Every structure is written in structure tokens, then in C-alpha cells.
Image: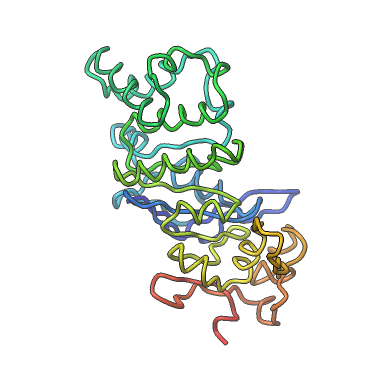
Amino acid sequence: MLEAKEVTVLFSARGIVIPAVDEASITAEKGKIIGLVGESGSGKTTLLRVLLGLQKVDKGEVLFNGENIFKLKSRKLKEFRRLNQIIFQDPFDSMDPRFRVYDIIAEGLRYHKIAKDKNEEKEIIYNTLEEVGLHPADKFALKYPSQLSGGQLQRVAIARALALNPEIIAADEPVSMLDVSIRASILNIFINLKQEKNVGFVIVSHDISTLSYISDEIYVMYMGRIVEKGNVDEIIEKPMHPYTQALIASVPVADPKYKIEKIPIKGEISYDHFKYGCRLYPRCPFAMDICAKETPPLIEVSPGHYVACHLIKR
């Protein structure tokens, strides 16, 4: 289990110190897909980096199977790296263009000394390529990144992570740069890996419709804070935070007769919003005086469904 507990990360912008992540908690575990959603600037990627130990925290802790990851050293740190992998948003920039696909995947195997010999290394690589839909594997193993499409490269990125037999894979906008026609095939790979290999995922996206298709739980993030979280059906069918409602209302529907609901918030994220108790206050049509002064706590409104909004207390 990988969990961040009330972590805060402070960044400096225009001479002002702001919390990119503010007392946010998230839990990832094997066999479960967690979706982390919010518009650009919400702190999603920073929180993902915190989970993997790629970003230091100013407050809070990150635990992997009960141990603080920032205190891991030597062998334990190396094992943590193997068991918790990442898939980057841009598959073109995340691979060395001088390496063939075979060596891109083999690099991790060799570093962690997973394969006993060359034959086992080859078997692992070929099997993994087949698992992510790149077949015949021997054909793709010899190609360079420049010879592959975006969808094929993202499959290679998944194979590179999967070859190390991880427990958790963190994916930062894994389909945002891909054609709509192939997004579902990539998402289905994640679902199959969860079901067949018990791999856990944390998937960052600004598209709540994508996460509703693949996730078991959804965390809604706004300006560094988790404002709503719960089972995917609860979040999609009974959104209670105005920001979650706005994200769902913004999803286009392929029906010309469907009446689009008015998005209940206005404007954009601004650094000035950090001075308010609830950072959605300047954009929220339901804002009250208390919202400007006090940060709403994350409270449980139904089993497993948590919301941080002063409206819930009324």
C-alpha cells in the first residue's frame, strides 16, 4: 500500500510562497485504480510525484507498506523504485531515441537484476510486449521510438513499467496526447493488468469522463486540496461539491437534443484565491461569508464518500 498523509508542498511563484499541495491525503493499493482529477494548476502531478518520492514534502509523510519512503536507503529504496513505477504524459520525451525498444525495456531489468541470463531477459521483454498488444514482439523489439506511433510508444512505456513486476503504476495523463480512436485500447490495458496481475494504478487526468470509465475511486483536486473523494459511482451520480459538479457538467454529450447544463462556476484559477478559506470562493455561485474565512473540512457524507464544502454542514 502506498499512501500520502496530509502532505504539503510549497512552491514559490512571483515571489509568493504558495502550497501546490495542501494537506492532501491519497491511498493507492494493489488491484485498485485511483483517479485523480482537476483542471490544470490543481496540483495533481505534484501529488503524483510526491507519492513516488520524486518531490520532497514540506509537511506530512508518504508511507509504503508502513515505511516512510523519504527515509528509505540503499536496498529498500531500490526495491521501492522497482515496485512503484511511472508512466509519463508524453511517450516521445520519456524514451531515449537512441535505444531500440528492446533496450528501453531491458534497462530496468538489468538495473534491478531481475533476469538471470540473456534468455530470460529476452523472454520477459517479449512476453511483456505481447501483453500490452505489441505483436509480433520480435518485430517491435528491434524498432526505435521514431519508428512507432504515439499509441505504440505509450504501450512501450507501459511495458517498461510492467516488466519490473510493480505493485503500483502512476500514470500522468497517459492518454491525453493520443488520438481518441486509440485511447480506449490503452485504458483497457490498465483494466486488464488490474484484473489479471493485481496491479494498482493512480491515474491523473483533467477529464473526469475518462476516469469514470476506468477508476474504482476518484479524488477531485482543486488548488492543492482534495475537495471530494469516493467510489466512482458515488462521485459521478451524486457529486456534492460545486467543483465536481462543474467538471461533470463540462463533459460533452454526443446527442444534439441533450440540453447542456450551465457550468456552475466561473473564471479561472488564480494565485489570489489562496487568501480565501475555500479557494473556490471567488468562482462558486453558492459561496457564503464563511467560505471566505474558513477552510471547509473533508467530512464523510456517506460511507466512503467525503466532501469539503461548507454547504454540507448546513
Determine the residue positioned at 33% across, 48% down: 64
Left or right: residue 94 compared with residue 27? right
Q: Residue 70: x and y, percent?
A: 40, 44
Report the quarter where the C terminus lies: bottom right
Determine the residue positioned at 32% across, 51% down: 1
Query: In the current view of this chain or complex, which residue is farthest to the bottom?
Result: 314
Number of dots carrying numbers: 0
Q: How is colour applied across the structure in the image?
A: rainbow
Q: Is residue 258 above or below residue 34?
A: below
To which quarter of the image does residue 72 belong? top left
Q: Nearer the viewer, residue 174 or 294?
A: 174
Determine the residue positioned at 28% across, 32% down: 75
Q: Residue 119: x and y, percent?
A: 25, 13
To which quarter of the image does residue 216 belong? bottom left
Q: Nearer the viewer, residue 254 or 136?
A: 254
Determine the residue positioned at 41% across, 37% down: 85
Left or right: residue 24 compared with residue 33? right
Q: Is residue 93 above or below residue 291?
A: above
Q: Nearer the viewer, residue 305 or 51?
A: 305
Left or right: residue 19 compared with residue 32? right
Q: Residue 271: x and y, percent?
A: 73, 57
Q: Is residue 147 above or below residue 268?
A: above
Q: Residue 297: x and y, percent?
A: 52, 74
